[in-house]
Image (tube, rainbow, N blue to C red):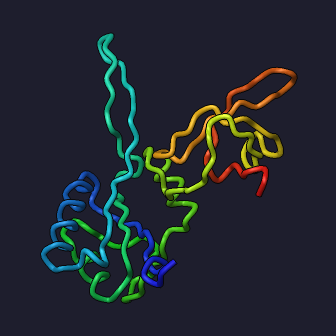
Amino acid sequence: MSEIESSKAWYVLHTYSGYENKVKQNLESRAASMKMEDNILQVLIPEQETVEEKDGKTKTAMQKTFPGYVLVEMIMSDEAWYIVRNTPGVTGFVGSHGAGSKPSPLLPEEVDQILRSMGINPRKVDMNVEVGEVIKIVGGAFAGMEGTVTELEREKGKIKASVEMFGRETNAELDYNQISKINE
């Protein structure tokens, strides 16, 4: 991992509730106009798809997971920090103690969980498993068992495997980080 790669992190911005989209738009345009795209990398509004039934009709809508908060992936520098915290609609960084102190980034596990809940594969995992291959399950409810890969969902970082449990085949959906190759 390069030094730049390791110094980038996700931070949480507090915004006026209802202004999340405007903050995202403002921040992206400020990063572009101030030539800071190398430091301010991504801006995300955590959302989940919800299903509502109204008047007998089913409707899906995107609902903000954390209203009033926006995530930003950035390389923390004095200039990037200044640009982000002075973006209209941003009230501050979460994890900053004020008085000019830099904020604490989110832990990688926290970021992974948020991205996964949005249907985004947090890390591209390059595990060369194939359909039909027997794998060892190292995490989750099926940890310690072996399974046969039945389907690969590389974009989502998931695999489906058939696991024998109580004398019958059971289908399991697993993250790549929950499996390992048997011959490794």
Query: Camera-side residue: 123 or 111?
Result: 123
Q: Position of residue 101 (x, y in %)?
A: 41, 87
Is 146 displayed left or right of 99 in the figure?
right
* Residue plotted at (53% across, 48% down): 157
Q: Position of residue 42 (x, y in %)?
A: 32, 64
Where, quadrant-wise, is the C terminus in this rendering? Answer: bottom right
Is 34 displayed left or right of 9 in the figure?
left
Query: Camera-side residue: 135 or 35?
Result: 135
Is 130 displayed left or right of 68 in the figure?
right
Numbered-mark total? 0
Q: Position of residue 83 (x, y in %)?
A: 24, 79
Q: Is residue 37 above or below residue 137?
A: below
Q: Is residue 58 above or below residue 119?
A: above
Query: Camera-side residue: 171 or 44?
Result: 171
Q: Quadrant of residue 8?
A: bottom left
Q: Is residue 33 above or below residue 101?
A: above
* Residue plotted at (76% across, 31% down): 163
Q: Quadrant of residue 35?
A: bottom left
* Residue plotted at (72% across, 35% down): 148
* Residue plotted at (40% across, 52% down): 66
